[in-house]
Amino acid sequence: MIDTHASQATLVIEAGRAERHYWRDLWRYRELFVFLAWRDILVRYKQTNFGFAWALARPFFTMLVFTLVFSKLAALPSDGVPYSMLVLSALLPWQFFTGALSGASDSLVSNAAMISKVYFPRLLFPASAMIVSFVDFLIACLIMIGLMIWYGFAPSLRLFALPLFILLALTTAMGAGLWMAALNVKHRDFGIMLPVAVQFGMYLSPVAYSSSLVPEKWRMFYFMNPMAGVVDGFRWAILGGNSRIHWLGFSLSIALVIIIFISGIVYFRKTEKSFVDNI
């Protein structure tokens, strides 16, 4: 590992320090984390005419299409709220998750030059890549605020629980993102397969419909998809008394999120030493 001492213009190579102080180094390199996140935000909207407006366009038009297809044509129930609000309350965490997962998956490969030249905790790459999706998520929340005003919908006190569900979505994205980032270094097939898996996963999650439509006998199997619990949590917090949570299935989703998060960190750290050789 290479370390720079502020009081001397020398480089000190200390074998094994990276392992002994890895988690402390995450804090020491916090300025690099901010730089990487800010760089990704600038690159995302560089040379675009509409800038951050694109963060509004994607969930807005997806909401319109889903409302037309599933509400007007398929006539699915909306749990007593406007169908557009039912859909958007699920699109917010889902698109945050998929954007963060995609960014984290490609973060190591796209920064191969930095990885092969200098030491710092590689965990910074997938973590900083998620900030772009989080910024998009915050901007997209303006659409939900607009819908609430349009329909005269007053949120309940459950809205104060929303930060907890945002943290749950972030934890899910981080755990899955660490798995995909590490796997994508050695097997590029995972990066190619990811968009297909994400598209398939959206229909296995209660995004365009309510989870209440899932038959009771299949409910526990359904909530083995961690994002099912995350989406239900968002709806419960945003829509108030008009939404219900299947608490047993939700607990299963939380348990799976924790497992994915912890195992993602363990696998990422286990394979981190081989990134330079495989990148």
Image (cartoon, grey):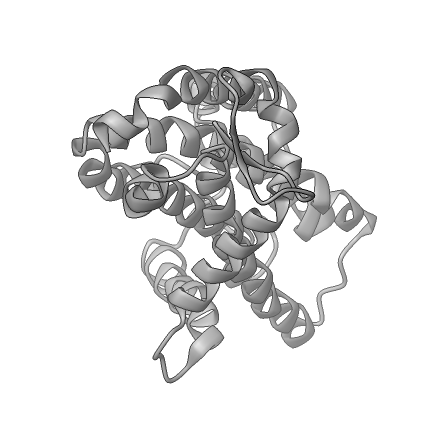
| Front residue of this view, candidates 196 and 134 | 134
Identify whether 42 is placed above or below 219. below
Kindly indicate the quadrant of the structure image that contains residue 168.
top right
- Residue 42's x, y, as percent? 45, 68
Q: Quick check: can you spot residue 73?
A: yes
Instruction: Quarter of the image for the C terminus: give it.
Output: top left
- The answer to whether 87 is drawn above or below residue 275 in the figure is below
Q: Residue drawn 48% across and 50% down? A: 96
For this orientation, the residue located farthest to the bottom is 49
Residue sitting nearer the eye, 138 or 26: 26
What residue occupies the far right of the structure in this picture?
157
Q: Which of the 4 image quadrants contains residue 165?
A: top right
Which residue does the image show at 54% across and 40% down from the upper left? Answer: 231
Question: How many badges with numbers are in the image?
Answer: 0
Residue 267 in the image, given as x and y percentages of width and height: 41, 17
Nearer to the camera, 213 or 96: 96
Seen in the image, is 89 located left or right of residue 57?
right
Q: Residue at x 71, y 72 (%)?
A: 152
Farthest residue toward the front? 9
Position of 63 relative to 168 (above/below): below
Q: Position of residue 122 (x, y in %)?
A: 45, 33
In this view of the protein, can residue 244 be seen by the observer? no
Q: Is residue 182 above or below residue 36?
A: above
